Amino acid sequence: MSRTPQRGVPTIMPLQSFIEVAPDSHFPIQNLPFGIFQPREGKPRAGVAIGNLIADLSVLEELGHFRSPEFRDRQVFSEDSLNAFLALGRPAWRKAREVLQHLLLSETPTLRDDTSLRTRVFHAQKDVVMKLPVRIANYTDFYSSYHHAHNVGTMLRGPENALMPNWKWLPVAYHGRASSVVISGTNVRRPQGQIKPPDASAPIFSPAKSLDYELEMAFLIGSGNSLGDPVRINHALDHIFGLVLMNDWSARDIQAWEYQPLGPFLAKNFCTSISPWVVTLEALEPFRKPLPSQEPQPLAYLRAKNDFTFDIHLEARLQTSSLDSPHIITRTNFQNLYWSIAQQLAHHAVSGCNLQPGDLLASGTISGPTEESRGCMLELTWRGANPLKLSNGKSRKWLEDGDTLTITGWSQGDGYRVGFGEVSGQVLPVTPTP
Ligand code: MN
């Protein structure tokens, strides 16, 4: 379809909402991420972010805007999690996006011209409390950044043996702990546990001294698969609702002593933080990039037609009690992941493992080839050997009590950003033992 160009008007106008959205806002009409919020008065319910506002989906649902075959007569947006909506599958997710994009468009009068309806539908983001977007059924953490795996492997085994022999054949992962996944803004309590000092013959019980962050992203399973039924890779995306930012808080000294031979346990199960807004695959579609080539070629069950990754710029910021403003300590990109989300999902389910709505599947630390693109302190300081220098003359080997670590990320469009908001948490001292 072509439109006659008008004088002085660009031929391609990006979609615009009647809600004012700044060019660097993470939440223009092109994004429309889903989340769960609680207004000052009332119960948690579903919303989408638009500019600095949230549109209350439970109100729009009550008014009948989502009455369509895709929703199968289900009311899903007055619930306190997105799980029921996720279980409806991609046709309903697409329908919801289409309805919302239409309602919020500058040309659509339904909300734009009805002041009392607008008062019921819109909340200022600053006036609400964000909740976990889903009841997280299960949580898995992959290890899919080549540079992260290579750096950590080099520290442990030297550059010759940095990657384990399986690493380029399968997306390595471990099953994590779902109950301690928390929403951005939740403080993280420094854990304590068994630590073995390098020159000691026995472990001691102590607060973790090498507390770390891991800059990650994670995707949420929408519709699941039945136990015993693997998901074919070319159908993997049907099961993925969207992505969030994640900080996989890690206690390196506890990890070093406990991890062999079964992998991380207490070093990772004390807190994992995610961002509140789930950005859908539909919103990320303009930012698809070809997956970097994989050598050796993976087995057939991991080969997808036109597999892809996303161009998502990612940053980690450190704020300490003595810094005037936060320091950006990591700058990286989602494209630094070797394995795609389709490959991760297909591999996870190839055993017949049943994925469920609300499962959280995380990328692993996203490090790139440069020093500034390293996604955790372990790599940035090379296990504490090269402390980070801060502008006030202080330095950091690991996170200290009172430090706040914030991860943010966005895809840059032409005049707009599809952003993820942020995931942030402050380190609290260890709980005093009586
Ligand atoms: Mn991790």
Image (cartoon, rainbow, N blue to C red):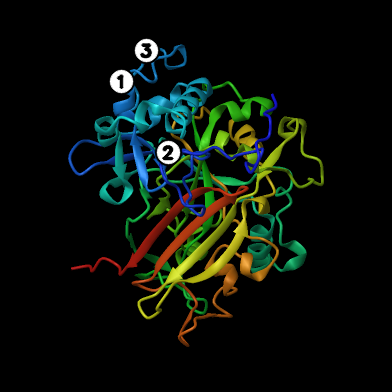
Percent position of residue 239, x then y: 55, 28
Q: How crowded is mark 2: few (under 14 residues within 10 Å), some or many (20 or more)?
A: some
Q: What residue type is labelled 1?
A: Leu
- Residue nearest the viewer, comparing 365 with 157: 365
Q: In which quarter of the image is residue 238?
A: top right
Q: Which residue is identified by label 1?
A: 63
Q: Is the C-beta separation of discs 1 and 3 under 8 Å? A: no
Cβ of mark 1 under 8 A from ligand 1: no
Percent position of residue 224, x then y: 50, 25
Q: Which residue is identified by label 2?
A: 18
**C-alpha distance separating marks 1 and 3:** 13 Å
Q: Is the C-beta separation of discs 1 and 2 under 8 Å? A: no
Residue 327 against residue 233 in the figure, above or below? below
- Residue nearest the viewer, comparing 209 with 394: 394
Q: Can you tell which mark lies on residue 73?
A: 3
Classify the position of the N terminus by image quarter: top right
Cβ of mark 2 under 8 A from ligand 1: no
The numbered mark, 2 or 3, whose residue comes first in the sequence reads 2
Q: Which residue is drawn at 30% across and 68% down?
A: 430
